[in-house]
Amino acid sequence: MGKKVTVIGAGNVGATVAMRIAEKELADVVVVDILEGVPAGKALDLAEAAPIEAHDSKITGVTNDYSLAKGSEIVIVTAGIPRKPGMSRDDLLSTNAGIMKSVIKEIATVTPDSILIIVSNPLDAMCHVAFDTSGFDKKKVIGMAGVLDSARFRAFIAMELNVSVENTHAFVLGAHGDTMVPLPRYSTVAGIPITELISDERIEAIIERTRKGGGEIVSLLKTGSAFYAPASAATEMAEAILKDKKKILPCVAYLQGEYGIHNLFIGVPVKLGSAGVEEIVEIKLTDEENEALQRSAQAVQGLVDDLKRLG
């Protein structure tokens, strides 16, 4: 096929990302995991589905062997422990930072020209770990958050109005968590702002559900966390890069003064193309929206400070 994407982590998110990329025939896929046999088994299962799904993408699964990642256009990192009921994203910080460092060291050595899409939680903080460990250009380290959070917002808007999700568009900025900043003014149904279609009270309820979207799924599943929608979000980002689509998507990117935020990864609208983050799009925010974004940035900064203390 020519293009290659490596997925780190063969859990629910990683395996579903591999499936979506293969079935869209975006690239051949290498899946790497620490568990013996698991990535190879899932890759074989997906390969056996290929005749039915009618694609010729090659899927390879390996245990602790990063050599096959060489030449990857994109590396999608899903490795880490998942959230469990009652666990905050902050609780994941120390363990997943260690996992992220070890993974990125391998990737930076084997495939230094790749673009990193980070999915592991707490996501904004893990982007900092990946950026600092890899030494990659800021354009090539991107977090998957806004696409997922905006998709949840869009889904809830469609449910509220009983309309097609294809008609809905939404923007969610800020950190991936309770301080995220959904923007009703920039959220529309067939071009009509939702502020003209939904009451303020219901919009606030939808925003609150969006903020707690991941936790709602964790509480329902009991023994796991969301993976279908996160995988779809990462795949949309990968497709925009692989096809050089110049697509505007809300992603976690490294800001150096944009939105008044300095040296911090946080969710903002970006243009995604073959170079990674090709442009950070600055939209006009009201004072209230800007204050919410700054609070969200402070929450991320707190995690980054904790990372520094943890070493």
Image (tube, rainbow, N blue to C red):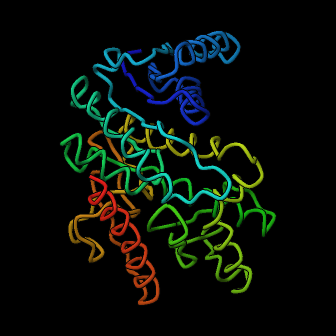
**Outermost bottom residue:** 287
Towards the viewer: 146 or 307: 307
Is residue 57 depicted above or below 228 in this figure? above
Classify residue 160 by image quadrant.
Answer: bottom right
Q: Residue at x 46, y 88 (%)?
A: 288
Of residue 120 and residue 268, the one placed in the foreground of this image is 120
Q: Position of residue 115 (x, y in %)?
A: 30, 37
Residue 92 position, x and y percent, is 49, 51
Could you tell whether 226 is left or right of 121 in the image? right
Q: How many marks?
A: 0
Q: Is residue 246 above or below residue 34?
A: below
Is 114 placed above or below 194 here?
above
Which residue extends farthest right? 162
Front in this rendered view, residue 91 or 198: 91
Q: Is residue 249 above or below residue 103?
A: below
The percent position of residue 221, horizontal first and vertical second, equals: 75, 47
Q: Residue at x 71, y 43 (%)?
A: 223
Give the farthest residue toward the front: 310
Q: Quadrant of the N terminus?
A: top left
| Residue drawn 64% across the image and 65% down it | 212
Horizontal and vertical percent position of residue 140: 27, 44
Quadrant of the image occupied by residue 66? top left
> On the rendered structure, is 143 left or right of 52?
left
Query: Residue at the location (30% across, 75% down)?
Result: 259
Q: 277 or 167, which is in the foreground?
A: 277
